Amino acid sequence: MPSSISNSDSTDMNASNLNTGTGDPKNSDPGNKHPMYPVGAQGENLEASEGMRQGIYGKTLLLILLGMGLALAMIRVFAWSMDAGPTDFLGRVLEAKDALPQVVKEDKELVMVFGSSMVQAGFSPREFDQWAAERGYENIKSFNYGFGGLNPFYQEVLTRRIKDVFDENNRRLKVAVIEFNPFQTTITRYNRNRILEDSYLTILGTNAELWDIMLADPTRGFRLFNIKYLRNSISAEMATSFLGGSLREPRKRTELERDPERRERLDEVGDLLNQAFEEEYPDYVPSNWSYEWQGGGTIAAERKPETLAIFEEYYELIRDPARMDDARLNRIHTADIIDMHFSEELVVKFIDLVNQFKTFSDHVEVVMLPRNTKWITHSAAGAKRLRETVQRIEQATGVTIANHQDLPVIKPTMFSDATHLNRYQGAHNYTKYLVDYIEPHLRP
């Protein structure tokens, strides 16, 4: 969802009290012996003033209620017209959350890789399990819990839900691999996502957590319950920012030119791949997070050789320099990916979620995933801030952060854009590396 507006869902209205006194106190006398007005007239004046006050209060209250009703109706109309609801903007998250009761009932040892869209794109759980089995660890089942659009603030709330299910079922993770994504933890990222905060809290938080907020801040607590139960978890900020997206300050665009022939061929190859998918997966049921695929995607072992050959061409075509440069500029604008001014709030939340995972995991790894070194280069100041933040997280959690940003097995040609690994080259190679990296912790 686009840009930010006011954090308030309602408008406070202040009315000044009418002066219903009988005059300047200096001109009155004790016992009202010499009133400015006859006693009878003075009483009539007080009664008239009281009636006037009640009329004003009544009209003010009516206006407030009408305004609230109109605002609520507008939100409901927006949700209806856009067919919008929690599953539309958090579908993958909610499907993965709903799968947790089934995950904890697996009879194998569990591995979870948790993080951002870089994990979603860059980790292949079924290939991980195959390679682990080849090394003799046949009792392992892994899951991809990577989600786009969730910074550590929201990841921490989701971690509580994961912990709830594991604790309730007396289950533990064999290994938790948690991604620390530097550009998801910046001030820029935090500020751009604040418009989603209330909506996401009502979707991912429990009523008990919302009640705790109510006790600490009644105004905000009331607003959160209002958003949850009367607005289908769509806050006014979310709706108005969506509608006002065109008013945002435009970001810088690439000055490189796209090759029209390359774009035309890319469209043709995309059609071929869609057709191949329908032929190779005729029984596929569309989902945002597939339990059958363990939260991951397709794997090379299931694809025809000719399909993989088409993918080779596809990967070459999407590495158009103009496309890659524009993706880089987008990350600079939306996430401060070069200079990385870190958000105190998000760093604290990341520390909290790591410490939560430690309570239901036999072993916790924190890693930084591979970086597209051709297109993303940190400034000297940004690299310094990153080192300092990594050190702080390590001290607060007792977990060393493994830097996988510059692995020799990962090349810039293995990325689908400025930040995400492609599936059959990047994710394939990184997943294989990850098996080797955590193998000591897979042992009984």
Image: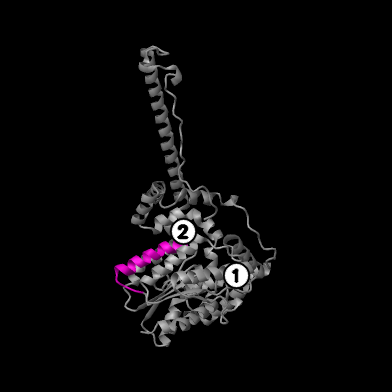
Rendered image: mark on residue 320: none
**Does the stretch in magenta take in 251?**
no
Residue name at image x 51 percent, y 57 percent:
193
Rendered image: mark on residue 383: 1
Q: Name the residue that disc number 2 marks.
A: 89
Determine crowd level at label 2: few under 14, some 14-19, many 20+ residues with C-alpha closer than 10 A. few
Q: Is residue 38 above or below residue 138?
A: above
**Is residue 149 something one can see in this rendering?**
no
Residue name at image x 38 percent, y 23 percent:
50
Q: Residue 108: percent from the left, percent from the top?
A: 34, 79
Q: Residue 188: percent from the left, percent from the top?
A: 56, 59
Q: Is residue 253 above or below residue 18?
A: below
Provide the major secondary structure of the magenta segment: helix
Q: Which residues are magenta?
A: 152-172
Residue type, label 2: Phe
Q: Quadrant of residue 171?
A: bottom left
Residue name at image x 63 percent, y 71 percent:
375
Determine crowd level at label 1: few under 14, some 14-19, many 20+ residues with C-alpha closer than 10 A. some
Relative placement, left or right, of 113 versus 423 is: left
Separation (CA) of disc 2 from disc 1:
33 Å
Residue type, label 1: Ala
Q: Residue 273: percent from the left, percent from the top?
A: 54, 73
